[in-house]
Image (cartoon, rainbow, N blue to C red):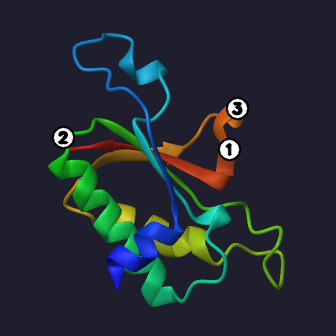
Amino acid sequence: MASLLLRSTSMSTKPTNNGNKYAHMAGPQLQLDFHKAGILTRADIIVLTERFLEICSQKKLQKVAIITGKGHHSENGQSVIKPIVEKILHNSEYVKTFSWAPRTRGGDGAYEISIL
């Protein structure tokens, strides 16, 4: 199920920043974009997020992003995906730190994550 869902979710790669003292200023090396994924269940969101973080750790990536969207298109204008992803990020063994992305890369509709 996870591999099928990963194919339907937008993931793009960018070159790594190994050894660059300015790497923290660069964009993410890999991103998971829920904003373009269509309708997902809570279970889908959990599986995709956990698998994405695991893959990022296995690839020894340093900085990644998860785009959740801001919730503008949700039923009550409240993000459904964002709180689920945030809870996973707080509890993940693969996450060193995370924060909202800079406004130019999605602001509070995206997380930038440092991987352990």
Residue at screen point 76% across, 75% down: 78
In this rendered view, identify the residue nearer to me: 59 or 43: 59
Residue at screen point 52% across, 66% down: 9
Q: How crowded is mark 1: few (under 14 residues within 10 Å), some or many (20 or more)?
A: some
User: Is 47 left or right of 31, judged from the image as shown?
Assistant: left
Residue 36 screen position, x and y as percent = 66, 64
Image mark for residue 104? 3
Q: What residue type is labelled 3?
A: Thr
In the displayed structure, would residue 68 be above or below residue 8?
above
Mark 2 vs mark 1: in front: 2
Q: Which amino acid does label 2 sit on?
A: Lys
Q: How crowded is mark 2: few (under 14 residues within 10 Å), some or many (20 or more)?
A: few
Q: How many marks?
A: 3
Image mark for residue 60? 2
> In the structure shown, which secondary structural element does the residue marked by tag 3 occupy?
helix
User: Is 27 left or right of 105, judged from the image as shown?
Assistant: left
User: What residue occupies the far top of the structure in this picture?
Assistant: 21
Mark 3 touches mark 2? (CB < 8 Å): no
Q: Which amino acid does label 1 sit on?
A: Gly
Residue linked to disc 1: 106
Residue at screen point 64% across, 37% down: 105
Residue 98 screen position, x and y as percent = 42, 47
Q: Give the Cα separation between the discs numbered 1 and 3.
A: 6 Å
Sequence-wise first label, 3 or 2:
2
Residue 93 screen position, x and y as percent = 19, 61
